[in-house]
């Protein structure tokens, strides 16, 4: 999926937060109690949409509304000309 950026469809979360960010959308339950989050949910968007924010909403998962945390992105569609 990293090659989608070659077609102007970068992963918005990675674009804005980099590779060190540890956000995740799904957390498997393991027998030994270790928790390792996985990023199964992504938003890919053209750079022309001017992504300005991207985050996972963990409260939805923690409150039992889903087994995944929704991912939300914000865009600045009309960038002001300077």
Image: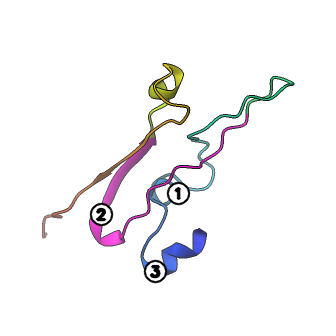
Quarter holding residue 30? top right
* Disc number placed over residue 50 in the picture, else none: 2
Q: Position of residue 27 (x, y in %)?
A: 65, 34
The secondary structure type at the circle numbered 1 is helix
Report the quarter where the N terminus lies: bottom right
Of 9 and 78, nearer the camera is 9
Q: Which residues are magenta?
A: 36-55
Q: Nearer the viewer, mark 3 or mark 2?
A: 3
* Disc number placed over residue 14 in the picture, else none: 1
Q: Is residue 47 magenta?
A: yes
Residue occupying the point 65% across, 44% down:
38
Q: Which residue is mark 3?
A: 7
* Disc number placed over residue 62 in the picture, else none: none
Of 77 and 17, nearer the camera is 77
Q: Position of residue 62 (x, y in %)?
A: 53, 22
Which residue is situated farthest in the right direction here?
A: 32
Main SS of the magenta segment? loop
How many residues crowd around disc 2 within 10 Å: few (fewer than 14), some, or many (20 or more)?
Answer: some
The secondary structure type at the circle numbered 3 is helix
Which residue is situated farthest in the top direction here?
A: 63
Q: Position of residue 39 (x, y in %)?
A: 60, 48
Q: Is residue 2 magenta?
A: no
Looking at marks 3 and 2 on the same chain, the residue that comes earlier in the sequence is marked by: 3
Q: Are marks 1 and 2 in contact (CB under 8 Å)?
A: no
- Distance Cα–Cα, label 1 vs label 2: 14 Å
């Amino acid at each position: 999926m990293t090659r989608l950026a070659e077609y102007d469809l970068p992963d918005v979360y990675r674009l804005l937060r980099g590779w060190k960010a540890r956000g995740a959308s799904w957390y498997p339950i393991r027998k030994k109690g270790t928790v390792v989050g996985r990023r199964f949910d992504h938003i890919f968007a053209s750079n022309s949409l001017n992504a300005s924010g991207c985050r996972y909403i963990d409260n939805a998962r923690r409150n039992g509304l889903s087994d995944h945390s929704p991912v939300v992105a914000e865009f600045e569609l009309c960038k002001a000309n300077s």
